[in-house]
Image (spheres, helix red, strand yellow):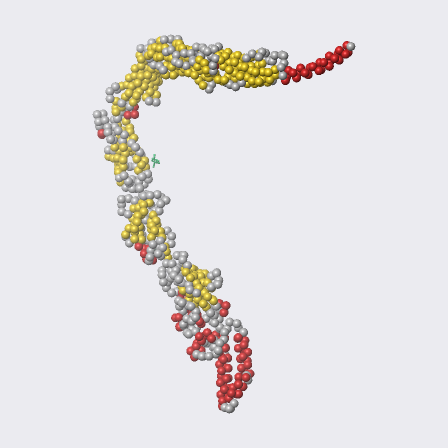
Amino acid sequence: MGLLLLLTSTLLSSYFHPWRVVDAQALFTIKGITLSIEPSDDVIRDTSVILKCQAVVSSSGQEPLSRHYTIYKDGEEVYTKTSSTSEDLLYRLPEARVSNTGKYKCQITIEDKKMISDFKRLTVTGLSVPEVHLNKGVVSEGEEVTARCMAPGETGSIIFYFYEDSKEILEKKVNSNQTEVKLRFNSVGIHKVHCAYTVLVMPDSFKSKDSNTLTISVKEYPITLVLEISPTYKIYEGDRLDISCTIINSQHSSQSIQLFLSQGTQLLRSESTKTKVSHNMTALAKNSGEFECRLVMGNVVKVATKTISVTELFSVPILTMSPAEVFQKEYMTLTCKIESFASEKLRREELIYSLDPSENALSQNNGEFSGWALQYDLNYTCIARAKGIVKHSNTLTVRPKVPVSNPKISVVDKVVLKQPFKILCKSDNGSLPINYTLLKDKSQLSTISVKLPIQKALFTVTVTHTDEISKYTCEAKNSHKKSLVSEKLNATVIVPVSRPTLTVIPPLPEISEGDHLYLICGTQGTPPVTFKWYRVGNKQPLFTTTSNNNHTNYQVSGLTKQHSGTYYCEAVNHANKAFSSEFVDIEVNLATWKKALIGGFCLLVVSVLVVVLVLCFRSKRVRVDKAVTSVWSERPPEEAANDEETSMVSNEPDVEYTEVVHPRAADSAKVPLRKGTDTVYSELQNAPHGAADHHDYGSVEYAELNGEQPEINHCSPEVNNYQDLPVPVD
Ligand SMILES: *[C@@H]1O[C@H](CO)[C@@H](O)[C@H](O)[C@H]1NC(C)=O
Ligand SMILES: *[C@@H]1O[C@H](CO)[C@@H](O)[C@H](O)[C@H]1NC(C)=O
């Protein structure tokens, strides 16, 4: 039985216990929470305000839930309470203050569940009137007063302000509704004091009204300062100044006393523990102005001032130069001048002048220094002295100028006829600015003023004749003096090359194999000239040479048929414009001995024919026709041999044979016989002597050479002479 009871109770406890846990945890829920402010969100100071936090919680359990409330103001916790009832939470502000202004929220926490309300803003207006209190009503200079400002009933963070005669003089921040400060008044008389405060409610602040106003009487400290300066009447530069400052009617005070004597920012003298300070000095013009004596005794400061005026004995000297512009080693005068002086104190003769630097041997006469200008720049100052007063003038920089040297005229680059070029005019020495003028035959063309060392006087001109260049001169001038003239311009005028002519020697139709050929290229233009010979079809020149003459030749020895072709030459000089000649066709003829061989053979054939014909006519007149036929058909043995030679010649591809007709006595005489056999060459017949044939030789000039020199060997020395012909332009 006991065993049964135990079993039952174990079963029951295991059955009910989990039920109870589930019940307590799950059977409540926070449905909502609201915050309200009574009587209103907007109240005036001293109102009793209640913040009410109302939470709606549903639960089924019998046991009361533990509710934890928190009130937040501007995010900070201001109140908490735990209750086990379902009553609303009340947060009371019995006397609302401006510092209570802010945003409030309420939060409820039950076990692990929380809920927070929306915020409500409470605004409290109205601040208490501040009150000011002073510990004394009468003080003497430098004495302190304790002032207290109160903000009755206010709470929170407060800044207090203190005012002296409506001007803010002090502020202090405290977390209390009252504060104390020490005030000191610097001037003698009645002062009014009040205060005010500001309550800080972040992010705002609220300012109170002004407090009551209290008056305080500040009495003068019984001490007097006397500042004396002598002489008391008109003070001149150089006078001795005596300055003294004395304390009178001093009640013997235990406080330490300090006296300061100053002018502007310069402290002249100071004394401590004495009742007098004095200073003496020589009066200078710069001492015109206010002197100050200052007494410092604890917090008490007393000041006495006096203004003086110092009359100049003489004015600051002014140094000038004449002439205003001086050249090296020229005469100049430096004048040191005093504009005004106190004639009642000083005679002009008492003024003594000197020059700094003094070692340059300028003779002086009453402030005028004369002499020869140096060769370098110098800064001069003059000094005037009288009655112990020394005055320095302005600094005068004397820069003796360098006279311009003879200008030199030159050309900048090459001079090409009829093309613009630049002329440079330059003097090696001379102070700037220098004016350069270009002249042609004494007439001025233009002027350039050179002001900087990097500038150059460059003139652009063009010449149309080679001798025109020497008409140019230039002038340089940098002073009132006469300008200097350069020499005449000396420069070579380059005449550009003209179209060159290509001359062929031996003359064209007479060029034969084995001949020595001269191709002479000539032009007009200033040497040196660079010549190039070309054969049409070749890009590269056959030959290039630069000659100091304006003609030269290119030679080919041992001509062959391969040298036949079209040739031309090109000429260029420093004017840089190249010109080409016209084309010249060169045909190399068969060698003379070959022509002679052919001619001889033909003559032989003709003579044989003649002999045969004569014989036939004489013997048998009847059988004339047959006989002629037999002569043509039967060949004599020596003629057959000649025939072989003819066929051999015919094998040469370039040689062209035509019919053997019109043999001319004159031409035959000119062809020298090289071999026993005469050969007649077709071109020889067709080309009339010395005349241009189908070739377009144009300006090729070879006629004179042809006529005089039939033989090449005789011609060669003449060619060399030709090169030495006078140059047309130089
Ligand atoms: C003169 O004085 C000027 C300015 O003070 C200075 O720059 C210059 O170097 C001086 N010249 C000479 C020659 O001392
Ligand atoms: C011109 O200059 C050349 C070379 O510079 C010189 O040989 C010639 O003598 C000069 N002529 C004159 C007239 O000065």
Q: Is residue 122 above or below residue 428?
A: above
Compare residues 518 and 724 and report the one nearer the observer: 518
Residue depicted at 42% across the width and 78% down the height: 666
| 17 lies left or right of 36 | right
Tell me where residue 12 sits by quadrant: top right
Q: Position of residue 82 (x, y in %)?
A: 57, 12
Q: Is residue 82 above or below residue 493?
A: above
Q: Position of residue 426 (x, y in %)?
A: 34, 48
Compare residues 121 and 238 and report the one nearer the observer: 121
Marks counted in the figure total 0
Q: Position of residue 326 (x, y in %)?
A: 28, 40
Residue 265 appears in the figure: yes
Compare residues 2 and 573 and report the one nearer the observer: 2
Q: Position of residue 359 (x, y in %)?
A: 30, 35
Residue depicted at 51% across the width and 91% down the height: 622
Q: Quadrant of the C terminus?
A: bottom left
Residue depicted at 40% across the width and 9% down the height: 133
| 97 lies left or right of 262 | right
Residue 297 appears in the figure: no
Q: Quadrant of the N terminus?
A: top right
Q: Is residue 141 above or below residue 454?
A: above
| Quarter of the rendered structure image containing ligand 1 | top left
| 183 lies left or right of 226 | right
